[in-house]
Image (tube, rainbow, N blue to C red):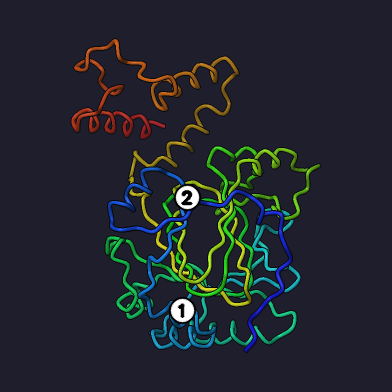
Amino acid sequence: MDTSQDIRPSPLDNLAEVAACRLNDRRDFQRLITAEKPVVIQGLFDHWPALAAGRASPSCLNAYLKRHDQGDHATVMEAPFSSGGRYVYAPDMREFNFSKRQRGITETLDQIERNLTIEKAPFLAIQMLPLQSHMPGFVADNPLPLMPPQIAPRLWVGGPLKTQTHNDRDHNLACVIAGRRRFLLFPPEQVANLYVGPLDNPPPLSLVDPEQPDDERFPKFREAMRAAMVAHLGPGDAIFMPKYWWHHVTSLDPYNAMVNYWWGDFATGLERANDAFLTALLAFGHLPPGERTYWKAMFDAYVFKTAGDATSHIPPALKGVLGAMSEPVRERLKAELKHAYLKS
């Protein structure tokens, strides 16, 4: 079966490359996490039988995956041939240009393989398949000692797709087991230059096609591209993407498969950063400019500490919520906030 594909050169290929490394132990990996920068990791899962099958052929990997299929259904995404493989918003941004449904794993893998020989076939993919529950034999066969056992892997299999620029609230370790992928990455602070769609229609996506940007409609995107990096991954390569880094992923071959791990968004209740952000939208969005300036200064000084420690003149015992919170102070603050929110 010929699975080669003529991929035209892209201007994205000329961007600065994400650094690559090999890891010696878990401490090396922890240092990467602490650095909060994307990194390509080589040789991390060379021992996986799934990688050997993926390197052999789509048929071999599909057969391997089907042996582990327990008969459960998977989330399957499908977009028409006319989409060009781009999973994006529909024109009104209320919906997306792909359908999503539950479908048998084996039958979907068979259809993905058949599509390799069908002209103008739709773009089909299994995405975010929780392997621990749906293919526990795969997890046992393909361990990654680097990751704690409670961080469960997910499987992605499909055609030559382009996943529109988005980000995750978790750290992401993506391991390519078949096909080639290009990851275009933007730092979190580029959000204002990416023209992101509605937050209440998750996942929020950038409206810009990075390979053919509309400079007239999206002029600030040029600034985002100046900060962008690119990573080219083949089978056996992994990429670590810290929380909130924006990424656009292109599958460069007709058949592609990847296993990823998400972790890090462990906060609950009143300590969830995203909920605090939504509360801030509610509380500050309508304020007049002078009040917004005040609260921005307060956040800069006491939350983000952009100018250093603004409390160094206060004795540690009197800093309260502005200092290193003890558990009693933390619990008292939570109780006060719960009471305030209940009154609303």
Placement of 103 over or under 170, stated as above or below: below
Q: Amino acid at mark 1?
A: His
Q: Are marks 2 and 1 in contact (CB under 8 Å)?
A: no
User: 70 or 92: which is nearer to us?
Assistant: 70
Q: Quadrant of residue 120?
A: bottom right
Placement of 207 over or under 110, stated as above or below: above
Q: Quadrant of residue 10?
A: bottom right
Q: Quadrant of residue 130?
A: bottom left
* Most distant residue in the top direction: 313
For label 2, count other residues whose C-alpha is less than 10 Å away and answer few (under 14), some (14-19) or many (20+). Answer: many
Residue 76 place in picture, x, y as percent: 55, 73
Residue 70 place in picture, x, y as percent: 38, 84
Residue 144 place in picture, x, y as percent: 32, 67
In the image, which disc is placed on residue 224? none
Structural distance between the alpha carbons of marks 2 and 1: 33 Å
Residue tagged 2: 38
User: 278 or 19: which is nearer to us?
Assistant: 19
Q: How many marks?
A: 2
Placement of 113 over or under 78, stated as above or below: below
What's the residue at 59%, 61% (across, down)? 182
Residue 272 place in picture, x, y as percent: 38, 42
Element assignment for label 1: strand
Element assignment for label 2: loop
Q: Amino acid at mark 2?
A: Pro
What's the residue at 41%, 40% (across, down)? 273
Residue tagged 1: 73
